Image (tube, rainbow, N blue to C red):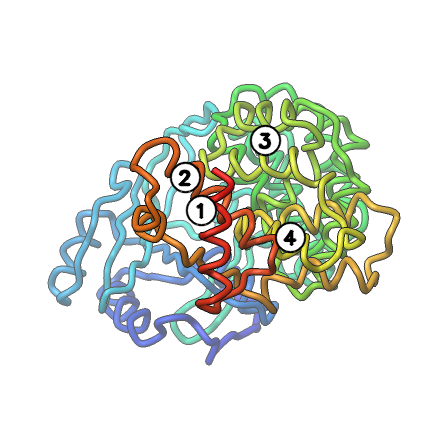
Amino acid sequence: MPGATGRSIAGAAWPHSESLTRLLGALDRDGEEARVVGGAVRNALLGMPVHEIDVATTAVPDEVVRRVKAAGFKPVPTGIEHGTVTVVVDGHPFEVTTLRRDVETYGRHAKVAFGRDWQADAERRDFTINALSATADGTVYDYVGGLDDLAERRVRFIGEPSKRIEEDYLRILRFFRFHAAYGPGGHPDADGLKACIAGRAGLDQLSRERVRMEVMKLVVAPHAVPTLIAMTDAGLLLRVLGGVSYLASFENLAKAEAAAGLAPDPVRRLGALGVVVAEDAERLWQRLRLFNAEHLRLVSMAEGWRRISPLFGAPAARALLYRLGPEPFTDHALLGWARSPASAHDAGWMALAGLPQRWTAPVFPLKAADFIKRGVAKGPSLGQVLRAAEAAWIAAGFPDGAEALAGIADNAVKSS
């Protein structure tokens, strides 16, 4: 049978496997065929976690809707004009797309026609490793050499790379992102790299939201460091970020995260890669249309990475953690560590970065009522006394005994 490989992933640990079996059972019969496609098949073959499952089918969207309704599932027409229906089975969503072939391509919004040819559908996808499909019994189909590329950990465009890129310039970033995630960590595919460089001007046409999404995924990929180096050498990273990239800082931060036992964090890594001063944070906010919370974290990193050191001592570190909160404190500590002369195994920096896991900052126990009963009137003076008492409480090491707290409150009132 054309495309059948002899490979099988029968028994793959699909998420929501019972729901998937029921969905395929409804679609894969009575003259129509349905398969799991794309990233789910790729990851299953690699023994990697599968988070989302996409299904392709020969059935046209109206028939998909009819069948899933008859089976008691909920169809949601999330992209029905392009052949996509999200089907909710037992509360779990699956994206079901009718096989397509390109009639006309003009960037992201290609004009397509529905079809029944699995090979034609595979050939319109981006990379060979993303064009694999598998039937309900686990039989794997490969029409474009994806299995060989998967074995070699090679990310390769399907067909002519320049044509694939012209169809959607986001594929330049996806090429590097998939190389960082699935490649061997060395040089990207030469033909693909050449086409990405030639098509780099097309990056300017992309929405900032789409670029942000790819950048955030790329920076946390296993081989992000060599991939970002390759992008820099090709003149592409400057075009994406609009400013200087600090690759040594990025690499050191990745090592510090690992040494501290922390998962890769995309915002923190973006800060290590592109933020030294507050203006860098503003540029990336606009350039990538970052979420406001992401922007504020970058601003905090720009202001704080120079102001933290294990040499300041434990009391100062706890005071800073109290003021900042766990996430900003960790950002500052890891970025300060990454930009210091210390190694990734420095005991002082490791202890500092791990402080939020060992110590939870208490809540300031004194309230406005404690000072009102001491004769402080409501108004600006009350706020001043509260702030002075809080500073004294922090300097004293966060005491919680009644006598110590009473002394702090009395002294704050006397000094006001």
Report how far apart the C-alphas of labels 4 and 2 lie in the structure. 31 Å
Marks 3/1: CA–CA distance = 17 Å
Residue denoted by label 2: 101
Amino acid type assigned to the residue bearing label 2 in the image: Arg
For the residues bearing labels 1 and 4, Cβ distance under 8 angstroms: no
Disc 3 or 1, which lies upstream in sequence? 1
- Residue behind mark 1: 121
Kindly indicate whether the residue at mark 3 contacts the one at mark 4 (C-beta within 8 angstroms).
no
The residue type indicated by label 3 comes to: Ile
User: Would residue 44 be found to the left or right of residue 18 on screen?
Assistant: right
Image quadrant where residue 89 sits: bottom left
- The residues tagged by marks 1 and 4 sit, at their Cα atoms, a distance apart of 28 Å
Residue 280 in view, yes or no: yes
74 to 156, vertically: above or below: below
x and y percentages locating residue 278 in the rendered image: 63, 26
Pointer 4 and pointer 2: residues touching (CB < 8 Å)? Answer: no
